[in-house]
């Protein structure tokens, strides 16, 4: 088996848009959480993967190496299920997913992100992701682990999407709002047909 490249620059992060991409996310999560960490299947695949969630995937070439789920609430985005396959740890994949997710959330107009951090990883989240524990919130447990709520304020994105954004921009693929999509092409064709 070929050894992975150990540089963060080799990773490409993208928004999951196809069933094949989603199956790769599930395969990575099953490998890390269910097989490696002995998390019960029903806890890992909790019913929140399709409705209201965006998944990110990091790849080394075509090989899926890390994933993250984002759920969108009224005034915050929640980062969940951040995992990296064991042979790819040490290449900053999780950190890069978090930064990508922060930029995406800010672009969508969110000012805050929330994460439930494993209590033993609080220092890591503080150092690497600029997260801070939420004041006055208790440690809580599930899956036989202790967690701490941590948050990060996001800078306002001057290009944040809003109700006043261009209509066709709001129907472009998630995370790809600046590039014309299929409906832009359809609109251009309709305009040309009207001018004839």
Image (cartoon, rainbow, N blue to C red):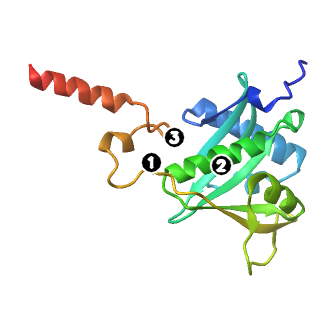
Q: Residue at x 82, y 29 (%)?
A: 7
Q: Residue at x 81, y 67 (%)?
A: 147
Q: Which residue is mark 2?
A: 69
Q: Earlier in the sequence, mark 2 or mark 3?
A: 2
Residue 97 position within the rendered picture, expressed as x and y whole percent measured from the top left: 70, 43
Q: Residue at x 46, y 37 (%)?
A: 173
Q: Earlier in the sequence, mark 2 or mark 1?
A: 2
Q: Is residue 105 shown above or below 195? A: below
Q: Of circles 2 and 1, which is in front?
A: 1
State which quadrant residue 78 falls in: bottom right
State which quadrant residue 186 falls in: top left
Label disc, if present, on residue 175 of the rendered structure = 3
**Residue 51 visible, this orientation:** no
Residue 177 shown left or right of residue 155 in the figure: left
The C terminus: image quadrant: top left
Q: Earlier in the sequence, mark 3 or mark 1?
A: 1
Q: Which residue is mark 1?
A: 159
Q: Of circles 3 and 1, which is in front?
A: 1
Q: Is residue 158 shown above or below 76? A: above
Residue 176 position within the rendered picture, expressed as x and y whole percent measured from the top left: 48, 36
Taking depth in this image into account, of 95 and 62 the one nearest to the observer is 95
């Amino acid at each position: 088996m070929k050894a992975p490249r150990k540089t963060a620059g080799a990773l490409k992060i993208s928004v999951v848009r196809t069933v094949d991409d989603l199956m790769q996310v599930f395969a990575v999560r099953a490998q890390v959480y269910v097989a490696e960490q002995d998390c019960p299947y029903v806890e890992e695949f909790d019913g929140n993967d399709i409705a209201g969630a965006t998944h990110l995937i990091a790849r080394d070439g075509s090989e899926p190496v890390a994933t993250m789920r984002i759920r969108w609430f009224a005034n915050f985005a929640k980062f969940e299920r951040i995992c990296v396959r064991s042979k790819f740890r040490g290449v900053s994949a999780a950190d890069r997913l978090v930064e990508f997710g922060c930029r995406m959330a800010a672009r969508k107009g969110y000012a805050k992100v929330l994460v439930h951090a494993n209590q033993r990883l609080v220092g890591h989240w503080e150092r690497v992701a600029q997260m801070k524990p939420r004041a006055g919130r208790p440690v809580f447990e599930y899956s036989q682990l202790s967690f701490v709520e941590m948050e990060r304020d996001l800078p306002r994105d001057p290009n944040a999407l809003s109700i006043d954004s261009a209509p066709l921009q709001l129907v472009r693929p998630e995370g790809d709002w600046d590039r014309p999509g299929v409906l832009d092409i359809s609109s251009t064709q309709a305009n040309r047909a009207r001018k004839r």
